[in-house]
Image (cartoon, rainbow, N blue to C red):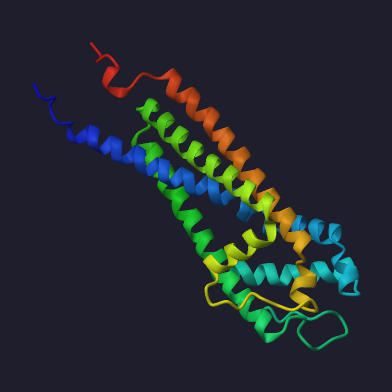
Amino acid sequence: MAAPPPSPRRRMRAIGAWLLGVSMALLILLSGPLALFNPWFVSFEQARNEVPARLATSQAEVDRVTSGMLCDLFIGCDDFGQALAGSSTPLLTPAERSHMRDVGHLVRLLAILWLLAGAVAIGMLVAVRRDRHRIGGALLSASAAVGTGAIILALIFAVDFNQAFIGFHEIFFPQGNYLFGPGSNLLKLFPEGFWYDVSLSAGVSIILTALVVLVVGWRLWRAAPPRSEVPAAT
């Protein structure tokens, strides 16, 4: 005898759990990398990679110029015309500024996606709050999927960082305006070592966030029986 079809309420809970899983996967994937776009971390990595010496200036000047560019990335000024002290010429060439505008468009798109994912996650947590088993399953699925993908990407970047970095640009910047010569001030401001450290930090942040969500999901999934098994109140 065929099993009866699931009730509308049960279908809604299943859809809510699926949306929760997708939104949590996006939050895990984006939270750490977006958080790295802050002046303190960027300044630390630029000092570590001797950016002031590359540009023949001070760390304070590098911080000032970079902070303006980070502001342009998120606010959408799309100017990137910052100049070092004593110079009226922008540090970056028109081609470099064009690429930075493309980077800004991507960063803002990801930030908006992160905000939407957060809103959906909160909404779905409220909608299925009584079904902790489904919530736990959604968190487990999201963290496992993103964590596994992050580990695979980390291995790819570790084996051949240059090719992986170029491949990333080819996917997200198909217009191809990301190749510059060794004398490029953009490459001096954000050298290869800088991006290697940022990529490593982003990967670690994603994996650690996935582990935290995995533990929370496991505890919820184990502690609560499936909703259909919860005895009705008498």
Position of residue 182 relative to residue 166, above or below, is: below
Seen from this angle, which residue lies furthest bottom? 88
Residue drawn at 36 percent across, 44 percent down: 19
Q: In the picture provided, is 46 more to the left or to the right than 138?
A: right
Q: Quadrant of residue 106?
A: bottom right
Residue 181 in view (yes/no): yes
Residue 226 placement, left or right of 93: left
Q: Quadrant of the C terminus?
A: top left
**Of the pair 174 and 54, the residue shown nearer to us:** 174
Provide residue 57's location: percent of width, then percent of height.
Answer: 90, 73
Q: Residue at x 56, y 68 (%)?
A: 170
Q: Quadrant of the N terminus?
A: top left
Q: Is residue 77 visible?
A: no
Residue pictured at 88% horizontal, 66% vertical: 59
The outermost residue toward the left is: 1
- Image check: 121 left or right of 178? left
Q: Position of residue 162 (x, y in %)?
A: 69, 61
Find residue 126 and report its horizontal and vertical position in percent: 38, 37
Q: Is 68 situated above or below 116?
A: below
Q: Residue at x 35, y 37 (%)?
A: 17
